[in-house]
């Protein structure tokens, strides 16, 4: 029978091998290419991460062998698809150390996860005069959904101050927390600056003041193992595509009693227990929040990405990323006219910067011509760019598959661009 089982269900337990960047790079086929006549240096990992071969293969295997709708139980393919789909949910639950897989909801990504909480919890809980706090360096997707529900409910959305280094002002947060604050929504890691927020301390303060905490984990999950129980947060959101998985799928973790109490987000198939014109009853968790045919292949692909991470020496990978960041900061300090944007003491491997007198977009184009992929612009974080008085930055964001040579090539290309532009 075993040959009938899809490969993503029959992984033998493997011991993580000590981290080796060259071995890891070989797992990512996209990295082995030339761009504009140069070997690709991919430094746009905060926008999306690349996919290891096993994730690509899991998607192909699913569509070649098991493609079928889930939870119908009508035939063998449906049973296989359902088993793999629900196994992926359990893998994510274990990855986040969630109490129960039913607390893992599939969404389209971080954006939809936050919209789900804002719409479902926000519409049913917020009262006029209630306050929602977000950090001043949030991604738009952790600002706008709150503004939308706040406008509907007569609540307000206020920024928690962030200083020039990109560090959240915890004293200001403590002072802002009063009985009217119902939700504190913060990024675990800022995508624009790389700052790591002290989520456990934020949770302690917010809970002591009676507020809930939603953590936007989009930029954290790829860098270290997140433990939602240790953090104590009420909601945790992330996107699979930033965790070496497919686009189009993401996760919302929520505390059980909150999810139980929240009304459905969308109506349709899957999310109901029974439907009649006399009245409809809703399904249990997690299906209550999963209307319609889900992204089955996406969930399975994310499950394969989790398997991949479990086989990786994550502590070694994290040390490697820290070393990449340290080297890039050291080299950046030697570039005349280069200003780092985001210099918090605790940072993920994100280097945001500007060159005096140069528009970030021009720099991005010149780097691209040399095979170097970075992101330029405001990084969907206009409020913090406005606070800093800049239109945007150039952002190089590293993953564990980047090398010291990638860092050196970035700075060699920057030097060339600088001489051309200045
Ligand atoms: N929050 C943060 C911190 C992000 O970096 C991103 C993606 N740039 C998002 C939210 C939105 O993620 P997605 O577009 O995958 O929903």
Image (spheres, rainbow, N blue to C red):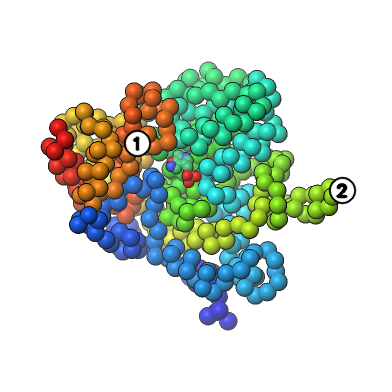
Q: Tell me: 108 left or right of 268.
A: left
> Which residue does the numbered mark 1 point to in the structure image?
377
Residue at 61 percent across and 68 percent down: it is 68
Is residue 323 something that shows in the picture? no
Q: Compared to 393, does 281 lie above or below? A: below
Residue at 71 percent across and 71 percent down: it is 74
* Dots 1, 2 in contact, CB < 8 A: no
Point out which mark residue 305 bears: none
Image coordinates of residue 22 in percent, x first then y, are 27, 60
Q: Quadrant of residue 116?
A: top right
Residue at 24 percent across and 59 percent down: it is 34
Which residue is outermost to the left?
A: 419
Task: Using a 10 Å C-alpha cutoff, classify the residue at mark 1 as few (fewer than 14 neighbours), some (14 to 19) or many (20 or more).
Answer: some
Q: Tell me: 125 left or right of 235.
A: right
Residue at 30 percent across and 59 percent down: it is 31
> In the picture, which quadrant includes the C terminus?
top left
Image coordinates of residue 164 in percent, x first then y, are 35, 23
> Which residue does the numbered mark 2 point to in the structure image?
278
Q: Nearer the viewer, residue 308 or 72?
A: 72
Q: Nearer the viewer, residue 99 or 380?
A: 380
Q: Secondary structure at mark 2?
A: loop
* Distance from Cα at disc 1 to Cα at disc 2: 52 Å
Q: Secondary structure at mark 1?
A: strand
**Sequence-first tag of 1 and 2:** 2
Q: Compared to 67, does 177 lie above or below? A: above
Q: Tell me: 189 left or right of 39.
A: right
Which residue is outermost to the right?
A: 278
Q: Compared to 386, does 20 lie above or below? A: below
Mark 2 CB within 8 Å of ligand 1: no
Q: Quadrant of residue 263?
A: top right
Image coordinates of residue 389 in percent, x first then y, are 34, 23
């Amino acid at each position: 029978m075993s040959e009938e089982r899809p490969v993503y269900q029959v992984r033998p337990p493997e011991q993580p091998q000590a981290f080796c960047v060259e071995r890891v790079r070989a797992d990512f086929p996209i990295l082995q290419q030339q761009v504009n006549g140069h070997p690709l240096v991919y430094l746009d990992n905060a926008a999306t991460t690349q996919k290891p071969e096993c994730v690509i293969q899991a998607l192909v295997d699913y569509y070649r062998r098991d493609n079928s709708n889930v939870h119908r139980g009508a035939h063998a393919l449906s049973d296989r698809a359902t088993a793999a789909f629900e196994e992926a949910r359990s893998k994510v639950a274990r990855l986040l150390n969630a109490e129960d897989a039913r607390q893992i909801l599939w969404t389209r990504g971080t954006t939809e996860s936050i919209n789900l909480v804002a719409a479902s919890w926000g519409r049913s809980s917020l009262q006029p005069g209630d306050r929602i706090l977000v950090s001043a360096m949030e991604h738009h997707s952790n600002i706008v959904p709150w503004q939308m529900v706040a406008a509907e409910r007569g609540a307000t959305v206020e920024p928690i101050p962030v200083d020039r280094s990109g560090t959240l002002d915890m004293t200001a947060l403590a002072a802002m927390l009063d009985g009217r604050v119902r939700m504190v929504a913060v990024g675990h890691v800022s995508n624009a600056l790389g700052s790591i927020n002290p989520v456990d301390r934020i949770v302690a303060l917010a809970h002591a003041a009676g507020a809930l905490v939603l953590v936007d984990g989009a930029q954290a999950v790829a860098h270290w193992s997140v433990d939602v129980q240790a953090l104590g947060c009420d909601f945790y959101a992330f996107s699979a595509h930033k965790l070496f998985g497919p686009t189009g799928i993401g996760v919302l973790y929520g505390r059980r009693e909150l999810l139980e109490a929240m009304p459905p987000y969308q109506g349709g198939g899957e999310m109901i227990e029974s439907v009649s014109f006399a009245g409809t009853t809703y399904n249990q968790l997690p299906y209550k929040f999963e209307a319609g045919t889900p992204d089955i292949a996406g969930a399975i692909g994310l499950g394969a990405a989790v398997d991949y991470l479990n086989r990786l020496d994550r502590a070694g990978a994290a040390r490697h990323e820290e070393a990449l960041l340290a080297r890039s900061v050291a080299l950046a300090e030697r570039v005349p006219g280069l200003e780092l944007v985001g210099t918090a003491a605790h940072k993920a491997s994100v280097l945001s910067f500007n060159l005096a007198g140069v528009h970030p977009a021009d720099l991005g184009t010149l780097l691209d011509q040399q095979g170097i992929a970075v992101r330029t612009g405001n990084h969907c974080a206009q409020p913090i760019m406005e606070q800093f008085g800049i239109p945007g930055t150039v952002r190089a964001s590293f993953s564990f598959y980047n090398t010291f040579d990638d860092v050196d090539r970035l700075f060699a290309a920057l030097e060339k661009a600088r001489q051309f532009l200045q």
